[in-house]
Amino acid sequence: MVTGAPDAGAPAAEGIAGSQRRLPPVTALGVAALMLVIAGGIDLAAHLPRPAPLGPAIAALAGAGFLLLAGIGTLARVQDFAWRTFFVVGGWTLAAYIVIAGMLEFVFVLDHTPGSLLTVLSLMLLVFAVDIPLLLAFSVARYQPASPHRA
């Protein structure tokens, strides 16, 4: 054993600052919201082509919406964060997911999805299209040097 040698398992100096900061649980809230939206969508799809009961899907949607808003709300209060990186990554990812959600919405309309089911599916797509860009942008920006000014 060599004394004075750097520990191979120790994080680099730049990594310490990003990983030691106290940030809100945006990732956990976002993943939980995504799980609820996916579970609600699977529940609806399992009943098709017969009429699907909307209760469980609406409950999952409400929970997902609450978790997504909680993640956005807790992140909005963070002052010392790489906001410029967050908005660059989030903006481009949001643009891509708006296209994806738009194509899926077009398929639902083209398939003559009934009104109430279409409404629930559309709101689930909205949560999906906002949640994933939030997760990606936060995951990138949390390891960047913090800039106190919002972009």
Image (spheres, grey):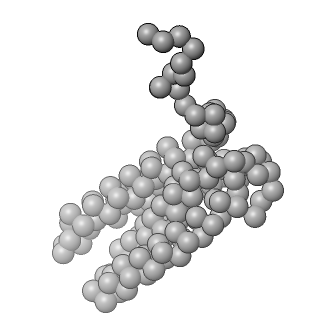
* Residue 149: x %, y % from top left: 81, 56
What x and y, as percent, mark residue 144?
64, 49
Residue depicted at x 70% and y 61%: 84
Q: Nearer the viewer, residue 123 or 33?
A: 33
Return the residue found at the far bottom.
110
The spot of residue 52 in percent (x, y) is 26, 68
- Which residue occupies the extreme front position in the image? 2
Residue 70 visible (yes or no) = no
Q: How many marks?
A: 0
Q: Is residue 34 visible?
A: yes
User: In the picture, residue 92 is in which quadrant?
Assistant: bottom right
Name the residue rendered at 44%, 10% in the picture.
1
Toward the viewer: 137 or 7?
A: 7
For residue 91, above or below residue 106 = above
Is 131 placed left or right of 71 in the picture?
A: left
Placement of 32 over or under 16, stated as above or below? below
Q: Residue at x 72, y 48 (%)?
A: 146
Residue 118: give x, y in percent of width and height: 38, 77
Quadrant position of the C terminus in the picture = bottom right
Q: Quadrant of residue 6?
A: top right
Say which residue appears at 57% left-offset and 58% top-offset. 137
Whether 87 is drawn above or below 19: the answer is below
